[in-house]
Image: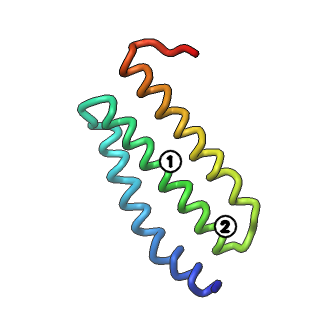
Amino acid sequence: MYEYAELVVLIGAPLYLVAVVLYTIRLVKGPTIPDMVLAVDCLSYDLAVFLMALSLYYRTPFLVTPPLMLALWVYLLDVYVSKYLISKEVGA
C-alpha cells in the first residue's frame, strides 16, 4: 500500500508542477473572468489532491484537513463569483 503512495507522489509531482504552470498562464492571460475563475478552481483542487497524496506519502493525518477546507473555500468562491456575474450584486 505504501509503495503505491510513493509511486503516486513521485510520478504525480512533476505532472502537478506542469499543471500549475499551465493554470497560472491561464490565470494571467485569461480573456474573461470565468476563465480566470476556472484556473483558480483547477489550481486549488489540484493542490488539494496533491496535499492528500502527500498525506498518504508521509503517513500523517494532519495534512488531510487543510485540503478539505481549501476545496470548500474554492466552492464558495465559485458560488459568489457566479452570483455576481449573473446579477451584478453579491448579497444574501
- Seen from the viewer's position, the closer of residues 91 and 56 is 91
Q: Is residue 15 above or below residue 31?
A: below
- Name the amino acid, label 2: Ser
Placement of the N terminus among the 4 image quadrants: bottom right
In this picture, residue 6 sits left or right of residue 36: right
Check contact, mark 1 vs mark 2: CB within 8 A.
Answer: no
Give me the C-alpha separation between circle 1 and circle 2.
16 Å
The tag earlier along the polypeptide, 1 or 2, is 1
On residue 55, which mark appears?
2
Q: Is residue 91 above or below residue 51?
A: above
SS at circle 1 = helix
SS at circle 2 = helix
Residue at 66% x, 67% y: name it: 55
Q: Is residue 39 above or below residue 54?
A: above
In this picture, residue 19 sits left or right of residue 74: left
Answer few, some or many: residues within 10 Å of disc 2's Cα (few below 14, many 20 plus, some between 14 and 19). Answer: some
Residue at 55% x, 34% y: name it: 76
**Residue indicated by mark 1:** 44
Measuring from the top left, give residue 4's x and y in whole percent: 56, 84
- Seen from the viewer's position, the closer of residues 91 and 17 is 91
On residue 26, which mark appears?
none
Residue at 62% x, 67% y: name it: 54
Placement of the C terminus among the 4 image quadrants: top right
Residue at 42% x, 19% y: name it: 84
Measuring from the top left, give residue 40's x and y in whole percent: 43, 41
